[in-house]
Amino acid sequence: MSEQTVTRQELADAVKDLVTKRDLEEATQQNKRDLAEATREITKKLTEAIRDSQTEVLRAFYNWARPIEVRLNRTDEIATRLSWIEERIAALERGKFPSSH
């Protein structure tokens, strides 16, 4: 800061590189757009990752439950057949013999 006088051209040259309020607003708006786009992209990827993990968990449970379901269904079949046999034995014990035709 000297006390020399400055010409208009020198002043214009010195101020031309300064950032204006409009430049700051434009930069702020661009930053907001960039941040919004990045947020959308992250949300999209995160949602996809969550869905993939849900699918993996469901597949794991399905693969685990299939053999158990087969066993349970077979157990139900065996239990049904056993109850029929018990009914027939009870009928025989009461003297109600099945017809012979």
Image (cartoon, rainbow, N blue to C red):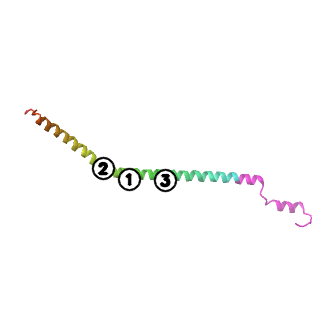
Mark pair 1, 2: CA separation: 13 Å
Specify start and end residues of the magenta stretch as a single range: 1-27
Residues at discs 2 and 3 in contact (Cβ within 8 Å): no
Whether residue 7 is in magenta: the answer is yes
In the image, is 100 to the left or to the right of 63?
Answer: left
Residue at position x 30%, y 51% in the image? 67
Q: In the rendered image, which residue does mark 2 sit on? A: 68
Point out the image quarter for the N terminus.
Answer: bottom right
Q: In the rendered image, which residue does mark 1 sit on? A: 60
Q: Of the residues shown, which amino acid type is indicated by label 1? A: Ala
Mark pair 1, 3: CA separation: 17 Å
Dot 1 falls on a residue whose secondary structure is helix
In the image, is 2 to the left or to the right of 23?
Answer: right
Residue at position x 77%, y 57% in the image? 19
Which of the 4 quarters of the picture holds residue 96? top left
* Residue 49 - label: 3
Q: Nearer the viewer, residue 94 or 47?
A: 94
In the image, is 3 to the left or to the right of 33?
Answer: right
Crowding at label 2, few (<14), some or many (≥20) Cα neighbours within 10 Å? few
- In the rendered image, residue 42, in percent from the top left (x then y), is placed at 56, 53
Residue at position x 17%, y 37% in the image? 87
- In the rendered image, residue 14, in percent from the top left (x then y), is placed at 83, 62
Foreground tag (1 vs 3): 1
